[in-house]
């Protein structure tokens, strides 16, 4: 087995879901790139005893490195540095020089934002953030919180604990200094490379895939295969040491043989495939969205450089907007209703025409929970993609919450776009 | 201390961040509503020994209930039911009647989607999903996976383990049956109510808030206060048993006294405040977005019923789209550039006019990472909100990734909208 690490994500706001954790996944991915596997991510609130329990659990799994994120702020509920210090047998003290450096950052921040701020309360917060366990390595703050590398006290055994701040931008900016610190490097010495590859299917059942893998037998030995059905896409992620590359090649051949009609990628995500296709072919796109109201446009522009090929879009919630901004004929709306294949096509064509784009996409539907009728229940969605050489449409009957219906509609539109631009499995 | 529970979220796809976990937070919130506190959420991959370790850890914290999500699918990496059965000392067997019911669901699913499917592989997946630990209570499948309530085997001690499927819609639909099951009710007997309240500030520093709380002293005893700075908003969440209500009232009075100029909510979220204001006042809104390209329109329409007051929006990435779909004068674009306060106002007014809305919102900026200049670096964003009685604009200089710049721009636009509709602290 490869070298492993454990992760603790702290914060009541993460535990209760008010904030989605981005640090656990990001750290797991960075560690993977270093050949380090993560077995557990433990999310804890702001109670010190819960953090201590989590550190104890991960130390007990025998990992040489534990990484924590969060709990380094100036408020009283931010206790990570102190708890980790105690856990490792290293009491904390104020680092006077660090205190000065943090104070300077805070002063700049307050000045730039033009905030009023009471000097005494700032100073007290700064002093708290400058508490460092004895013998720990300080990682220079990116925001106001320093990172810490805290090995076990002399004479103790156990993992090195790497303490990082909670804001993802600060944590990420501190990462290269963290892995360069001597105690972290020592903890991770002797790790071996682990490759990770992904195959993506659109339209195969998980149980069919399971049968393919079961029937394959020992030719797949050495591969750690995990499958995940997400937003209609079946994602097959395989991790393996380099000597198992032939087994992986065999797996891909098997998937092509049994599921070639749904296999649309042996690596890139759907969004990456579409971005590359637009860039390669010099085409442009515009969107016309009703129930998804901008979600597709926002998804198409998530990647930098998308301004080269995305001209824009219209979120046409009201019928008047469909008529006036997209040129959908009133008569079509009256005859077929706003949620109809005819209107989806007219919206796609309207987006093409109004933005002067090569490709237009129209989505119209009923996301719910209200607004359904016996004829057109909640989850009825029509998607149309029109390009220079014709188009493709789909009528959907989706189940799930408003959010699920909106997201799935966007994904189907992306799959239609992929099929139109690149061929391959139908959407 | 109140009754507590532990949560295990399974799946390599969650551990590695390919899928964001929605079940841990949802379960924590449901448990909170029942007066049950969650101390730890442990995320594990698909390795059975990691799941076993996590169950052992949570059992060791003394909780009477552990809930797992995921790992109930038909593929070989879905091992939760079997591992939990072993952990509780209850070997698994196929439940023949359950197998038939699952088989019927699978057959309907295949027929509806028009998928080809090999009967033998379907049957084998179905059999796997019908494996039930001896003596466990079966919760009827919503998709194809049943839930399970697995108490420790006779003569053993430890928590009841509630096993739920991974897809959030299935897990959520199964929840009421799960908490009604006798072993779960027994595990949670004797819990006490815990209230949770939230105060939201826009523009106060965390360290200033920390000083207010520190200075308050013992009048706040009995409150568990956690603060979180998220997307520029300082969120103060307090949990307390009912007898501490006077202490909480005191806290709110203190916050009004010291931070009244930034306190914009003692409960509802920003999005809820805005939705209520539009509904109350009978106004409508339309958006014009450049760098955020539909994110604001999508956020405004996340809630059902938003079609009453959102007319639509234009994502105008290209300058030609700004001219033709929003009527921004070419001359204005040439003179000030697309990223300028003048163009933000013209976009907001264009959206108002084109959609016939009462309120228009314009956002134009440089989300990066490319496209910055010395004059207008990445992170320069102009936001303008125009209503029937005038408007408000902000010039922003944001730092962070493309995603952070886009999301923060949308939040500032929402704060401007709130201030325009409801007054209160400036955005």
Image (tube, coloured by chain):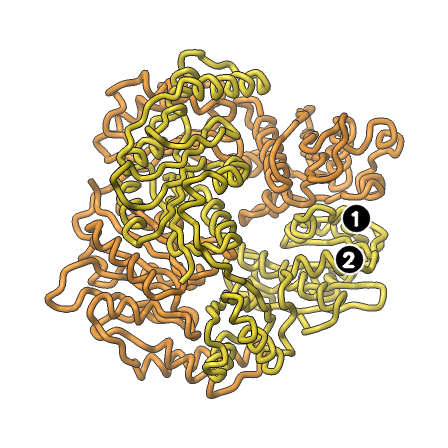
Chain colours: A yellow, B orange
At numbered mark 2, what does the secondary structure look like: helix, strand or loop? Answer: helix
Q: Position of residue B137 (x, y in %)?
A: 25, 70
Numbered-mark total: 2
Q: Is residue B129 left or right of residue A215?
A: left
Image quadrant containing the N terminus of chain B: top left
Q: Is residue B22 left or right of residue B191?
A: right
User: Which residue is identified by label 1?
Assistant: A308
At numbered mark 1, what does the secondary structure look like: helix, strand or loop? Answer: helix
Q: Position of residue B310 (x, y in %)?
A: 64, 43
Q: Quadrant of residue A82?
A: top left
Q: Position of residue B112 (x, y in %)?
A: 55, 77
Residue A278 got which mark? 2
- Dot 1: chain letter: A
First in sequence: mark 2 or mark 1? 2
Q: CA distance from mark 2 to mark 1?
A: 9 Å
Q: Position of residue A130 (x, y in %)?
A: 40, 23
């Amino acid at each position: 087995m490869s070298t492993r690490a454990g992760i603790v994500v702290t914060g009541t706001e993460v535990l209760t879901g008010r904030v989605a954790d981005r640090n656990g996944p990001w750290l797991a991915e960075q560690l993977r790139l270093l050949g380090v596997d993560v077995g557990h991510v433990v999310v804890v609130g702001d109670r010190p005893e819960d953090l201590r329990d989590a550190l104890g659990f991960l130390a007990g799994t025998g990992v040489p490195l534990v990484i924590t994120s969060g709990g380094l702020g100036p408020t009283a509920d931010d206790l990570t540095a102190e708890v980790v210090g105690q856990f490792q047998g290293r009491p904390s003290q104020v680092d006077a020089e660090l205190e000065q450096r943090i104070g300077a950052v805070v002063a700049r921040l307050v000045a730039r934002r033009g905030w009023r701020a009471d000097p005494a309360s700032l100073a007290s917060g700064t002093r708290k953030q400058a508490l460092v366990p004895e013998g720990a390595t300080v990682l220079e703050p990116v925001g106001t919180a320093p990172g810490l590398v805290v090995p076990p006290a002399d004479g103790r055994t156990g993992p090195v604990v790497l303490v990082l701040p909670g804001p993802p931008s600060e944590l990420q900016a501190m990462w290269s200094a963290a892995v360069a610190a001597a105690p972290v490097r020592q903890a991770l010495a002797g790790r071996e490379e682990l490759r990770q590859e992904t195959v993506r299917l659109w339209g195969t059942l998980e149980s069919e895939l399971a049968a393919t893998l079961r029937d394959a037998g020992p030719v797949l030995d050495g591969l750690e295969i995990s499958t995940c059905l997400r937003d209609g896409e079946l994602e097959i992620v395989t991790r393996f040491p380099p000597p198992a590359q032939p087994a992986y090649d065999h797996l891909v051949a098997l998937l092509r043989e049994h599921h070639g009609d749904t296999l649309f990628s042996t690596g890139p995500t759907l969004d990456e495939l579409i971005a590359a296709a637009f860039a390669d072919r010099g085409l442009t796109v515009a969107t016309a969205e009703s129930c998804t109201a901008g979600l597709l446009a926002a998804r198409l522009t998530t990647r930098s450089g998308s301004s080269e090929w995305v001209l824009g879009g219209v979120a046409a919630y009201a019928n008047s907007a469909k008529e006036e901004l997209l040129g959908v004929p009133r008569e079509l709306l009256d005859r077929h209703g706003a949620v109809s294949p005819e209107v989806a096509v007219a919206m796609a064509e309207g987006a093409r025409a109004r933005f002067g784009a090569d490709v237009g996409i129209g989505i119209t539907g009923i996301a719910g929970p209200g607004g359904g009728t016996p004829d057109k229940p909640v989850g009825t969605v029509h998607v149309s993609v029109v390009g220079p050489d014709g188009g493709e449409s789909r009528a959907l009957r989706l189940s799930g919450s408003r959010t699920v219906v909106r997201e799935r509609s966007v994904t189907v539109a992306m799959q239609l776009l992929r099929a139109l631009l690149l061929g391959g499995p139908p959407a």
